[in-house]
Image (cartoon, rainbow, N blue to C red):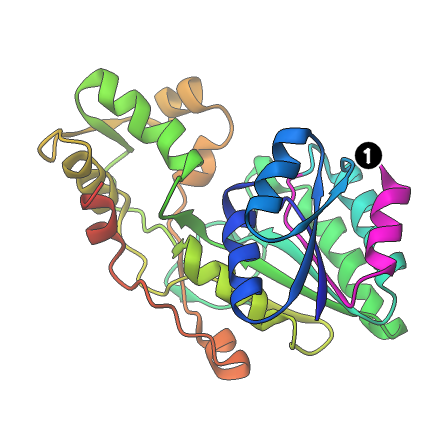
């Protein structure tokens, strides 16, 4: 299958391109710079020069593909909707896979699935109108699919590294928010990449949470990170107010208690996460 990917030079995008190649797909990937073009080409994809603001480029690239996977992070809901519209207009009846996240559900009060009610923190509240519009294409013959990824880890993880690991190295202990007993819905980047590939055959209008299904506590994860970076398990609690001051509004998302099951993707797509012990991965550094 001919697949066009946005965000292909990013953390998740690189893993997705590699997974697509393993499964025999032909990949073209958006590249906004020469560095990004070289990155996707080194992975076996053909670079399409342009950025998210180049809607005509996106539309044309989608029109010459059989499926689209939109991974690039837009700066606003308006930008993401414009990009999704251009891509869906271009792909027509082909599969369009859109990226969301589990944070939109807020705290889950136990193990939840894709049908849980939304209660998003402010940092991701903009996603609702975008995803509603994307899914509405299904009634007009389109093939939209949404993956709401959990907190991604493994490999060169930028978010956890920037917000937790790097500050922890400087402070001598990895921080967690509050009592650290909130659960994080984690997914390994390689497992998530396989889910994106599997989603190419999903039914129109499908929504899947991309999670590993283990859901460790924040304290367990930060302790494992501490061991992994040579801090001998040292951790420290910080208040939510401190976290907001240091991390910005994303701190409210990291404070959420979330647990999810990957059962729908397993049952409908045959997706089976291979990484089922996140703390062990973090502990290896």
Q: For this rendering, which residue is in front, 175 or 69?
A: 69
Span shown in magenta = 54-73
Residue 33 among those drawn in magenta: no
Q: For this rendering, which residue is in front, 30 or 276?
A: 30
Name the residue located 89 percent from the left edge and 58 percent from the top edge: 89
Image quarter hosting the N terminus: bottom right
Q: Which residue is mark 1?
A: 53
Name the residue located 48 percent from the left edge and 81 percent from the top edge: 270
Residue 62 among those drawn in magenta: yes
Q: Is residue 108 visible?
A: no
| Residue 25 position within the rendered picture, expressed as x and y whole percent measured from the top left | 64, 68
Image quarter hosting the C terminus: top left
Q: Horizontal placement of 268 versus 253: left or right?
A: right
Q: Place residue 216 in its image quadrant.
A: bottom left
Q: Horizontal placement of 177 versus 280: left or right?
A: right
| Residue 57 position within the rendered picture, expressed as x and y whole percent measured from the top left | 86, 43
* Element on which disc 1 rests: loop
User: Please, which residue is most extreme toward the left here?
Assistant: 232
Note whether 105 is above or below 52 in the view shown.
Answer: below
Note whether 256 is above or below 140 in the view shown.
Answer: above
Q: Horizontal placement of 48 versus 22: left or right?
A: right
Q: For this rendering, which residue is in front, 254 or 68?
A: 68
């Amino acid at each position: 299958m001919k697949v066009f990917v946005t965000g292909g030079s990013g953390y998740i995008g690189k893993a997705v391109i590699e997974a697509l190649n393993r499964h025999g797909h032909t990949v073209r990937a958006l590249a906004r710079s020469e560095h990004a073009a070289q990155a996707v080409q080194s992975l076996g994809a053909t670079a399409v020069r342009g950025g998210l603001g180049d809607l005509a480029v996106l539309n044309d690239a989608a029109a010459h593909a059989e499926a689209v996977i939109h991974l690039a992070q837009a700066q606003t809901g308006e930008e993401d909707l414009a990009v999704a519209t251009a891509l869906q207009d271009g792909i027509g009846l082909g599969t369009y896979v859109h990226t969301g996240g589990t944070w939109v559900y807020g705290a889950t009060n136990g193990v939840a699935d894709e049908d849980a009610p939304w209660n998003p923190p402010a940092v991701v509240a903009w996603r609702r109108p975008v995803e509603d519009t994307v899914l509405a294409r299904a009634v007009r013959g389109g093939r939209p699919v949404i993956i709401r990824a959990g907190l991604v880890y493994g490999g060169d993880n930028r978010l956890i590294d920037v917000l937790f690991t790097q500050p922890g190295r400087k402070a001598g202990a990895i921080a967690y928010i509050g009592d650290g007993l909130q659960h994080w819905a984690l997914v390994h980047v390689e497992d998530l990449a396989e889910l994106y590939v599997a989603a190419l055959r999903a039914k129109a209008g499908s929504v899947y949470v991309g999670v590993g299904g283990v859901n460790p506590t924040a304290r367990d994860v930060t302790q494992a990170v501490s061991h992994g970076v040579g801090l001998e398990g040292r951790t420290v609690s910080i208040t939510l107010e401190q976290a907001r001051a240091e991390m910005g509004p994303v701190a409210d998302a990291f404070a959420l208690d979330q647990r999810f099951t990957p059962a729908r993707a397993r049952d409908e797509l045959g997706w089976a996460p291979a990484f089922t012990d996140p703390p062990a991965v973090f502990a290896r550094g």
